[in-house]
Amino acid sequence: MMEGMRAIQWLVTKLSGDATITANATGGIFRGQAPSGTGLPFMIIQQQGSRDVDGAPGFRFFTEQVIVVKAIGRSTQDTTLVTIMDRVDALIQRGSGTASGSTIYQCLREQEIIFDEEAGGVLMTTIGGQYRIWVKE
């Protein structure tokens, strides 16, 4: 089973259904990578790793997914990026739910992410978090 995709589906559904996020992340929410030419700011959700938690041989209790959720925009959009990520944290920290028949037991942020980089001559800022999500198929 692909529990990582279920966790990402849960995140995309939860975040794209929120008015504060959609009003501020006007470029959209994407898995992995935004298409070329996407408007700013936008959000990316991507898996960083996972670990199966097994019991008896061949029996998987659940998986731990490590997923990064980040908002990306021009460095002049810091306030908007913080608004987006504050709302993300309020929605998913200690969150649970379901996605395509899988159970999301809990979601916890493990670390904050903040960095700047240049892209095409424009200074960009990324603000986000690395979250651990426990999923049972």
Image (tube, rainbow, N blue to C red):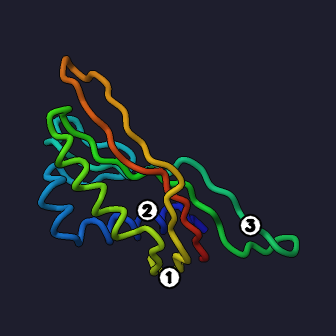
- Residue holding disc 1: 101
SS assignment at label 1:
loop
Pinpoint residue 50: horizontal percent, then vertical percent.
Answer: 62, 55
Q: At 38% from the left edge and 38% from the top edge, which residue is drawn?
A: 114
On screen, residue 40 versus residue 44, left or right, reads left
- Disc 1 crowd, CA 10 A, few/some/many (<14, 14-19, 20+): few
Label 3–label 1 contact, CB within 8 A = no
Identity of the amino acid at label 1? Gly
| Mark 1 touches mark 2? (CB < 8 Å) | no
Tag 3: Cα neighbours inside 10 Å, few (<14), some, or many (≥20)?
few
Q: Tell which circle, 3 or 2, labels the residue nearer the N-terminal end.
A: 2
Indicate whether 111 appears above or below 137.
above
Name the residue beneath numbered marker 2: 8
Residue at image coords 71%, 63%: 52
The type of residue carrying mark 2 is Ile
Quadrant where the image shows the N terminus? bottom right
N-term mark: 1 or 2 = 2
Along the viewing direction, whichever of 80 and 41 lies nearer the viewer: 80
Q: Position of residue 96 (x, y in %)?
A: 47, 78
The residue labelled by disc 3 is 53
Dot 2 alpha-carbon crowd within 10 angstroms: few under 14, some 14 to 19, many 20 or more: many
